[in-house]
Every structure is written in C-alpha cells, then in structure tokens.
Image: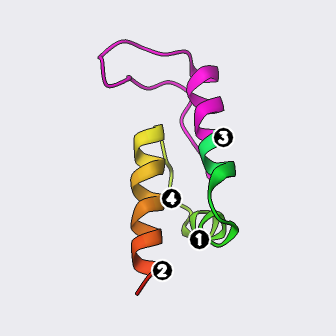
Amino acid sequence: MPEMNRSFPQSSGTYESAAAQQERMRQYFASLPPYIQEGIHQSGVNLRTEAELRQFAENLMGYSAH
C-alpha cells in the first residue's frame, strides 16, 4: 500500500484517529482492482487522506478506460 501520513483533518475539521483513517484507507485500497493497486504502488505518491486515495484511484481508472 502507498505511504500515508498518520494524522490529518477530516472534512468536518475535527481530527479522526489515525488508526481509524488508516483502516478505512486500507479497506478501500483492498477493494480496488489489482491493476489499480499496482498503479498506485508504482506511482510512489504520498496519499494522506481517504479522499486523496479515492481521487487518485478514480483518475487511474478513468485513464485506464481509454
């Protein structure tokens, strides 16, 4: 899984536990197709939030469809 920061704000402005955010990101990453997971790994991008992970994955899926 790509490197991710351990503490970051939620959209509500409050801080969610790093462990809870990390687990949600892990679950979402595991739900992605293997070729998208590999693309994220190979990119080396530092994703800090679930929203960043989702946006990056969606961009990869969009580019892969062409």
Q: Does the magenta portion include 14?
A: yes
Circle 1 packing at 10 Å, graded few (<14), some (14-19), many (20+), is: some
Amino acid type, label 4: Val
* Cβ–Cβ under 8 Å for marks 3 and 4: no
Q: Which one is in front in this view, the residue at disc 1 or the one at disc 2? A: 2
Q: Which residues are magenta?
A: 1-25
Residue at the spot of label 1: 39
Circle 3 packing at 10 Å, graded few (<14), some (14-19), many (20+), is: some
Residue at the spot of label 2: 64
Spatial separation of the CA atoms under disc 2 and disc 3: 22 Å
Secondary structure at badge 1 equals: helix
Secondary structure at badge 2 equals: helix
Name the residue furthest top. 14
When the figure is inspected, residue 66 is found, relative to residue 27, above or below; the finding is below
* Cβ–Cβ under 8 Å for marks 1 and 2: yes
Of callouts 1 and 2, the N-terminal one:
1
